[in-house]
Image (tube, grey):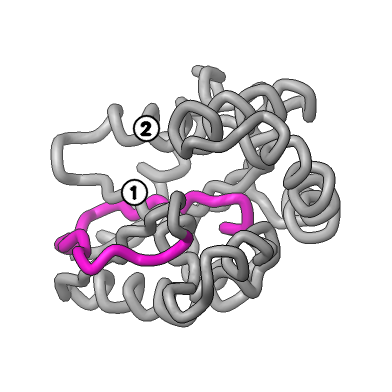
Amino acid sequence: MKTIIIGIAGGTGSGKTTIAKNIAKTYGKGEVLRLDLDSYYRDLSDKTLEERSQVNFDHPASIEIELLVKHVNQLCEGKTVNIPIYNFATHSRSEETRQVEPHRVIIIEGIMALYFQELTKLMDVKLFVETPSDIRFIRRLNRDIVERGRSVDSVIEQYKKTVRPMHYQFVEPNKYLADIIVPEGGMNRVAVDLVKAKIDMALSEKQE
C-alpha cells in the first residue's frame, strides 16, 4: 500500500482540525488517519506540576519529533504503532496509548507541522491554514476554558507570554513552505476540493 502524507499547519485556532476532518470525510471509512502533533508533547511526569506549567508548549522543543517521525515511517512500512495520549490537565502522557494501523492517507496536523524538516521531507502535500489573529484567539480562549479547564486569566497570560511570540517565530514563517495556503480556516469548501484533487493526483502517481 502506498501512503500519502499531508501536513496541515497554521496558528492556534486557525481551523486545522476542521479542514483535516473535512478532507477525511471525502474518502472512505478507514482510509484517512489523523495524527495530531499535540499527542507528541514530551512527557513531563518527572517534573512537579508547577514546573510543568512553566514549560513553553509553543516552542518546537516541546514536541518529541523523533517519535513522531519514527511512527510515520513505521506506518508507511505497513506496521501498527501506538500513539501517545496526552493529558493537558497534568501535562503528562497517559499510561494508555492509541493503537493505529497503516492507512492510505495520513494527515499530520499541528501548529508546527511544517516546522520540522525531518517531517516535511516525508510529506506529499503541505497546507497552511491562515485565519485572522483575533478569530484564532477567541477560538483558543473558548477551547482552553471548555476542554482543558483553564481560567480566562491563565489563557490570556499564556497567549501573551508564549503563544503570540512563538507564532511569529516558529509558525507563521512556515506558510511559505506550503503547497496551498487555505484562507479563513476549514470551512473553505473550495480549498478542501483543491486539496482533495492534489491528494488524488499524488495517490495516482504513487500507484503507477
Viewer-closest of 10 and 64: 64
Q: Is residue 138 above or below residue 179?
A: above
**Which amino acid type is marked by label 1?**
Arg
Q: Is residue 36 above or below residue 3?
A: above
Viewer-closest of 94 and 188: 94
Which residue has dot 1 on it? 34
Viewer-closest of 15 and 136: 136
Where disc 1 sits, the SS reads: strand
| Residue displayed at 65% across by 43% down | 10
Viewer-closest of 95 and 180: 95
**The N terminus - image quarter:** bottom left
**Which amino acid type is marked by label 2?**
Lys
The residue stretch that appears in magenta: 91-114
Please indicate whether residue 180 sits to the left or right of residue 47 in the image.
Answer: right
Decide whether residue 99 is among the magenta residues: yes
Which residue has dot 2 on it? 21
